[in-house]
């Protein structure tokens, strides 16, 4: 596995070594000792999976306070553009984001530490998205930032009229009004 630092503090792209042959492929998706060596100690406690169709944008989500979550995300089927936004006020990269394509061919993963809002947009007909988190889901501590917040300047790769949002995501707050991390 190759661990690639991004321009945003704490966010990493993980590129596995994929072994292909006539039968298919094999790769190690996560190896605790390697992960700790390159990123640090993160105790994942829950795995989640979603299936979405083209144009679905899930995000920009996070959990507040003691319920914040670090995430290791990847795509099992399809293509998405994945975004992590630094919402730690004290961070030198506050308000900056990482945007990376994750798909079933490149098998890349994205590690997002606590203190970030996260979202993804489906680019294929459908996508199966999975992620490990280091804290349980706590809906009463959930928050959302507007996916199209002008201060974030995220270059979503499809037209806004083709983006499908949940009611919750339509009600996301602008960054300047959001509950942020110190």
Image: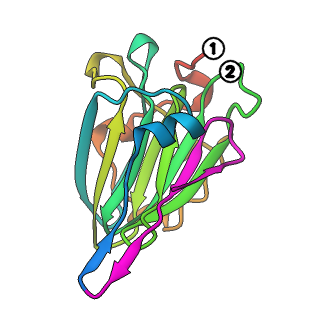
Residue 34 in the image, given as x and y percentages of width and height? 50, 42
Residue at mark 2 to residue at mark 1: CA–CA distance:
5 Å
x, y percentage for residue 58?
36, 47
> x, y percentage for residue 176?
63, 26
The residue that appears at 45% across and 12% down in the rendered structure is 65
- The verdict on residue 3 being magenta is yes
Where on the picture, by quarter, is residue 169? top left
Find numbered disc 2 in the image and state the secondary structure of the residue it sits on.
Answer: loop
Whether residue 125 is in magenta: the answer is no
Q: Is residue 59 at all visible to an observer of this figure?
A: no
* Residue shown at the point (47%, 61%) measured from the top left: 16
**Is 72 located above or below residue 28 in the figure?**
above
The residue wearing badge 2 is 89
As drawn, 50 above or below 100: above
| Mark 2–mark 1 CB contact (< 8 Å) | yes
Q: Provide the secondary structure element on which disc 1 rests.
A: loop
Per the rendered image, the range of residues in magenta is: 1-22
Can you see residue 20?
yes
| Image-based side of 7 in relation to 113, left or right | right
Could you say which disc has been placed on residue 132 in the image?
none
The one nearer the camera, 150 or 131, is: 131
Q: Residue at x 32, y 36 (%)?
A: 168
């Amino acid at each position: 596995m190759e661990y690639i630092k991004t321009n945003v503090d704490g966010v990493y792209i993980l590129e596995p070594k994929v072994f292909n042959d006539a039968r298919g492929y094999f790769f190690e998706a996560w190896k605790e000792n390697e992960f700790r060596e390159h990123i640090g100690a993160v105790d994942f406690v829950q795995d989640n999976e979603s299936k979405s169709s083209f144009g679905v944008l899930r995000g920009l989500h996070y959990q507040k306070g003691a319920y914040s979550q670090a995430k290791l995300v990847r795509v099992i089927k399809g293509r998405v553009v994945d975004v992590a936004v630094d919402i730690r006020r004290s961070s030198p990269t506050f308000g900056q984001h990482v945007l990376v394509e994750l798909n079933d061919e490149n098998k890349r993963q994205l590690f997002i530490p606590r203190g970030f809002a996260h979202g993804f947009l489906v680019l294929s007909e459908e996508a199966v998205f999975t992620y490990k988190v280091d804290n349980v889901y706590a809906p009463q501590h959930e928050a959302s930032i507007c996916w199209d917040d002008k201060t974030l300047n995220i270059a979503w790769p499809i037209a806004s009229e083709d983006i499908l949002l949940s009611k919750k995501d339509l009600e996301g707050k602008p960054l300047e009004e959001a509950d942020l991390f110190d």
